[in-house]
Amino acid sequence: DYPKYKIYFLDDSGTGEIAKKVKKLFKKVDVSSNNSNLGYAISNNILMKRAIKEFSPDYILHVDDDTEILERDWLKKLINFAEKQEEFGIGGVKIIYPDGSLQWFLRNKKINFSRERGIRYDDSEEPKTAEVENVIGCFFLIKTKVIKKIGLFDEEFSPAYGEETDFCCRARKAGFKLFYFGKTAAIHHGSSSANTIASEKIWFIKKRNYIRLEWLNHNYFDILKYSMIHLISSLFKKDGLTPTKKISLLLKAYAHNIKNIKEILKKRNERRGIRY
């Protein structure tokens, strides 16, 4: 029911087969495909650059392929809300599991992951709208002027994990506000692409990217604190990998970021020194 929009669909599987099916089913959708799996940041950057050049939108909305929107008038509600907020930069909605329980919940201005499926939070305790510190990447509404001011996603986070949180940090530092719009909900069915990757590789990529995220955006005390948390969780958290394997992967993750320390420090200093 929204009057003016354009849908872009990018098949990042590397085969192009999904793109062929979507083209047949949805004639008005702008469909393209990558020759290889490039990941969240690079693929989104490709589409955002195209959208800005071809369509000049006021907003860009990213929705993951495993996300299902529940209402017909969700876009009108979301844009109307965004237009009423001063310095609106990024917005997200309530994200739930297929069984209706909250996948992410709001606490102290932060969107937190609910690790236990089936836990239902009292709606009276869940605010309908609020300013927040981060927005979940599966449903990510960005005002275009944010991109023009701070740039696109950092592609060094490829293939995935951490890039949307880093983008949120940069947007807040530039003076934009982030919002949770709980009057609209979306079902996140789970990462279909991540399920095809070996658990060791996923564990390594997450640690590598979260360390990068911390080094780019946090103060040195917090970086030290998170380093201890990484070590302790590697030793004691039960997640299918042995402590020895996780320590080995953690050291590899730190080594990767140390190798790229010049690039990380350059971006860190740019974020501190430049007045957006």
Image (cartoon, rainbow, N blue to C red):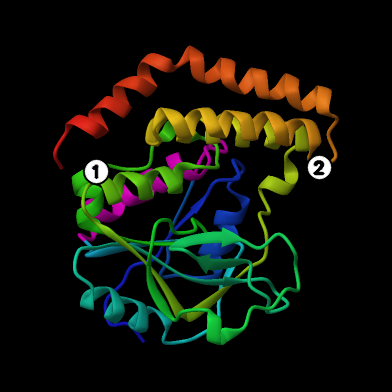
- Tell me if residue 115 comes above or below residue 12 in the rendering: below
Residue 51 part of the magenta segment: yes
Q: What's the amino acid at mark 2?
A: Asp
Instruction: Tell me the CA gap for discs 2 and 1.
Output: 36 Å
The residue sitting at 40% across, 36% down in the picture is: 218
Q: Give left or right: position of 228 versus 174.
A: right
Quadrant assignment, res 143: bottom left
Disc 1: CA contacts within 10 A as few (<14), some (14-19) or many (>=20): some
Residue hosting label 1: 150
Quadrant assignment, res 252: top right
Which is nearer the eye, 130 or 67? 130
Is the Cβ of the residue at disc 2 closer than 8 Å to that at disc 1?
no
Q: Quick one: SS at disc 2?
A: loop
Say the numbered circle drawn on residue 239. 2
- Tell me if residue 185 comes above or below residue 56 in the rendering: below
Q: Principal SS element in the magenta part?
A: helix
The residue sitting at 36% across, 46% down in the picture is: 169
Say the numbered circle drawn on residue 224. none
